Amino acid sequence: MRKNMATTKSASKRKLEKVEQNGKSNGLVTLNDQEESDEGDYLQTISDNDTTDDEGDQSGTEESDGEGNVIEDNETDDGEDDGSEEAEDESEDQSEDESEEGEEDASEGGEEDETESDDSKESDLEWESEASEDEVIKPLKIDKKLKSKAQSHSLDARESNKTSSKEKTIDISSSKNIESQGSEVQETSKDEYESGDTSDEEDIRNTVGNIPMNWYDEYPHLGYDWEGKPIMKPKTGDTLDFFLKRMEDPNFFRTVKDPQTGQDVVLSDRDVELIKRLQSGKIPDAAFDDTAPWIEYFTSDVMKTPLRKFPEHKRSFLPSKSEAAKVSKYVHALKMGWMKTRKELAEEAKKKREKNFYMLWGADDNSVEEMRRIENHLPAPKRHLPGHAESYNPPAEYLLDREELRQWKKCQETPWKRKIHFVPQKYKSLREVPSYPRYIRERFLRCLDLYMCPRALKMKLMIEPEDLVPKLPSPRDLQPFPTSMSMIYQGHTDMVRCITVDPKGQFMISGSDDLSIKVWEVSTGRCMRTINVGGVVRSVAWCPNQALSLVAVAADRKLLLINPGVGDSLVIAKTDILLKEEPEDSSAIPERVKAAVQWEQAKNEEWAAGIRIIINHFKEIRQVTWHGRGDYFATVMPEGIHRSVVIHQLSKRRSQVPFSRSKGLVQCVLFHPVQPMLFVATQRNIRIYDLLKQEMVKKLSTLSRWVSSMSIHPGGDNLLVGTYDRKMMWFDLDLSTKPYQTLRLHGTAVRCVAYHKRYPLFASGSDDRSVIVSHGMVYNDLLKNPLIVPLKRLQYHEPNNDFGVFDVIFHPTQPWVFSAGSDKTIRLYS
Amino acid sequence: MASAPESGTAQIQIRFTTKQEQYAVPDLPFAVPAGINSNELNVLLNELLREGRSDIKASVDFDFLVRGEFLRQPLNELLEERNVSFEDVIDVEYVEQHPTPEPMDCLMHDDWVSAVQVRHGWILTGCYDNTLHIWSKTGTHHLTIPGHSGPVKAVAWVSLTSTVGSFVSVSHDQTAMLWKWNIEDNSVDCIHVCRGHERSLECVSVNNNSTLMATGGWDTLLKIWTTSMWDTSSTTSQSSGDLEETEIKRAKLDSSSKSHIKTPIMTLKGHKEAISSVVWTDNQELATSSWDHTLRLWDAELGGIKSEIAGNKSFFDMSHSSLNRTVITASADRHIRLYDLRSTEGSLVKSTFTSHSQWVQSVMWSKTDEHLFISGAHDSQVLLWDSRSPKAPLFNLEGHEDKVMCVDWSNSRYMVSGGADKTVRIFKSRHAPSKTGSEEVKEEL
């Protein structure tokens, strides 16, 4: 049943709307607004009645009253266009006025009601419905006329009412309707429409306002009249009265009780008719033609082209920049907390409203929360809770006796040894306890402790020094290299200053302070020959030309070219033949050179000793070095100032002084192994000269005080420089004029450095008696920098007057290194 | 067994085996403490022998072989090293200990002795003072032979009869000299001067039937010569195409000298650095060791390289044993390495013998025992090794006071070594009774 009702209800509503539309457009308004809305509401009333049947009318009406009142206000609001308060006030005034009018109407209506009710006294319900039709139509016609008048001023309000009345809860409207129908249906046709909107007048007899009606349950009256006198509730009879009424009153079936006024209302015939129609599921308005032809105000077809002629502006497709900026601004503000959402604001307000309680015992927990952020936080040590001894009135056993007191006092110097840090004392009452004299101080100290003691573990950055050192390959992987001493060449009677190995590696020649050179067999340590040269030998150099058996020996001011007489006998003989006669030299020797250097053929005894040519220099020769081809050799005289470097040519027996001015104290010179270049090391710098172009190519700055020696990599692109200030520098000539790497391996001055011809090895000898062998790999790949790995410290030489190793040289073919030491020996490491 | 001290709770089961039948014991397993050492085993074995045999009275010293290695440490350590399970019965082979070599004589020279070789009773030595010396086994000096102009680096007997002997010596003067020694009137003649090498010679070796000799030196060439005393012209004509112009020139240059000049019949190129030693492995096969870290096997007939073994150090000396066909080498470190020239797969170094503290300069296999060899090193030690005992030598032949430069064991009776202390030391090698063969007696004359 209920379901059916619902469906019919919605259907009727729809139809109603249609009717309204029809009415508006056609002007065929048969029903006034009041009725339209009423009709809608009837439906609801009835349906509601259905629901509330079980509970009883009374309670249902009571509930509805409250709500009805609430919405009453809304209705007035809606009635006026604006929601502003002034407007509201006005509307209230208006409604008051109207209510006055309505009251008058109501009184009139009451009269008419009586008349009508008289008419239909005897009729049954069914009969009544038929009979009343005529009667209903009459006033409607009048209504029409009235309506047209009233429309002018109530049109706006009506329209809004339409919607609002539908929204109304059922009970309210029911109450309204009942009253309007029951008592005033007839008079409304006269007066009510004159006064204006009828919906406002419905509650005119409600003298109590928007209060639940049950508040008046206990009272005999219901509201107050103008004079302030209580309006008495109409008398309600007992069951007998009710029965009699039922029996006697022909209108009993159409009498309902208005809960707001407590008065009985007799429904009019029209109302009854309406109810009947509704109950039977018909459209309440009898005059409504539900089969009227459909008028299409708006086409139901979807139009293919838009109504508007012009296309949407481009701008409407693009997001607005200014809006985006605003949005981003808001987002930012929200994020930063400058702007708050309503929700947040509400929360804040709520919080503000709430009472704030101070967490008396929450401090500790809070601090824990805070301290959790500090990593490795160490919580402050807690103090012990006071025990019995701390009591002002401790038990006797806690008091110190004499012995204990003595013990306690004995620990004056070492207070931390005391069991308790105070003397327990007994007072009769807490009141007698004197103030603790050290309270302030102890508090202060405690605070200091807490403040000063850092309560987070300090994380030290643990970087092992080894981690900073670049990863070097293990020396084990870089074999072969010399690891142990294999041979000692003994025989010299003074410091051995220099050594040189023959190109084959079978023999080795050493020069010593005992004014001699010795020829050694490498593999056995046998001294094959000793040649007295009559001067301290500072440098020896085997001629790299294998077609010659020749060694250049720098002995004091003489440079001796000696045939050591070892090796290929044919070469030895040939060398002798070659050097026997002087080549005829036509060209004149410049005076400058002549003063510095004179060539001299060896005399008989000297020849027998192996000396072939003597080149007398004007200063002490420090170093002699051969050019790779074995024809040119250079000598260095550090004291020679401008003529400190002399280049000799063996085949022509000529000498040249290549530099007109010296750039410093020349320490050593070196020929480039493949290019015509000469390296000249002064104390601080190394200059590279192109011998063909006769110009300086490069100047390497060693950043050290005193260069002692240098050696060039057989590839010719890397230079190793040893200095007296303990450093060794590796220059990559392609890379820069600054050292590629500086090695500080030695404790004292580095005397000599040497490269191996074949293996990626280099060695350095130092005054600390040690030879350090390092791996120095030069890659063919130009992008790869040389790899330098110190491998082995070989310290076998014995100390002798503060000198250590004077010279190191590698075996030409084997990974062996020789070192000449101040202990008169030469050592071989393999 | 009861006398053996408890060196651990673990017990190992061992079984004694031997190849010396006179010392055979019953083939029964014994439980011995795991930590037993060779001395304790020796006591145990002697007890066993005394029980079983009545003929053996004196106690005999034995050496014990476990898994092919002499027991020099407690047994369990050796087993752990070898990953041998303690559960198994372990075969312990025992051999009579090699008798201690006796020092016999010390031959004083004027200079460093760089070469020595013994044939029968005669000891030929070469010195750094360019001379050769012949000594009898009793230590009497028979001859001093000057002739070389450079230190003699190697000597070798070619033939020796009771009346005449011939030998070859090589020297730094780039020549090898072939000498004929008439024993009866104690005179020596230089029959041939072998010229052809361009630098100093290092080594010489005569093949087994004394028809060919090979020399090597710093010119990296290996040259093969005939040892015939007579015809030089024929050898010249025979000389192969490898003969270089210089050799011919030089031959002409020195033709004025009395002795005939011999030229090599074959020159073998291949080494990149000095050849330090050459050995005939059989009549037509040569093995050389070189400073270029390689060992090479040559075919003397065809004149080509047969195989090559690369080491990682320069080789100073090698010795080939005809008994076990393996090679021991001395190189520029303190190790002696055992190579098997025939094998090509796996580790080329079969074992390494380490006891010297300096460069080993010379090694020599025993001619009669396949396990024994001697070595001389710059630490002035001469050591007698058993190839089954790589960690420790059998004996240290003490005596030298300076670098040992050469050792020789050509005559299995005498172990001879020469060194930089200008002496040649002779040790008499007493062999285990089982080993004394009849051939040796014959050879000894």
Image: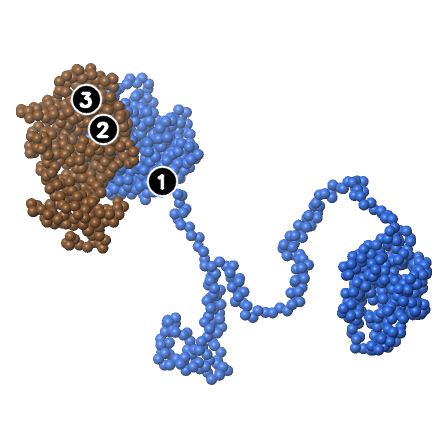
Percent across and percent down for residue B48 are: 12, 48
> Mark 3 highlights which residue?
B225
Say whether mark 2 and mark 3 are on the same chain: yes
The chain whose colour is brown is: B
- Asked if residue A587 is positioned above or below residue B113 in the image, the reply reads above
Q: Name which residue lies at 22% across and 50% down.
A: B12
Quarter of the view holding residue A406: bottom left
Q: Residues within 10 Å of mark 3 (few under 14, many from 20)?
A: many
> Mark 1 highlights which residue?
A789
Q: Name which residue lies at 36% across and 29% down.
A: A672
Say whether mark 1 and mark 3 are on the same chain: no
Q: Report helix, strand or loop for mark 2.
A: strand
The residue closer to the viewer here, A333 or B64, is B64
- Asked if residue A78 is positioned above or below residue A667 in the image, the reply reads below
Give the residue type that dot 1 points to: Val
Q: Report helix, strand or loop for mark 1.
A: strand
From the viewer's perspective, is A422 left or right of A492? right
The residue closer to the viewer here, B59 or B422, is B59
The residue closer to the viewer here, A156 or A310, is A156
Quarter of the view holding residue A185: bottom right
> Mark 2 highlights which residue?
B287
Q: CA distance from mark 3 to mark 2?
A: 15 Å
Q: CA distance from mark 1 to mark 2?
A: 38 Å
In the picture, the quarter occupied by the C terminus of chain A is top left
Which chain is indicated by disc 3?
B
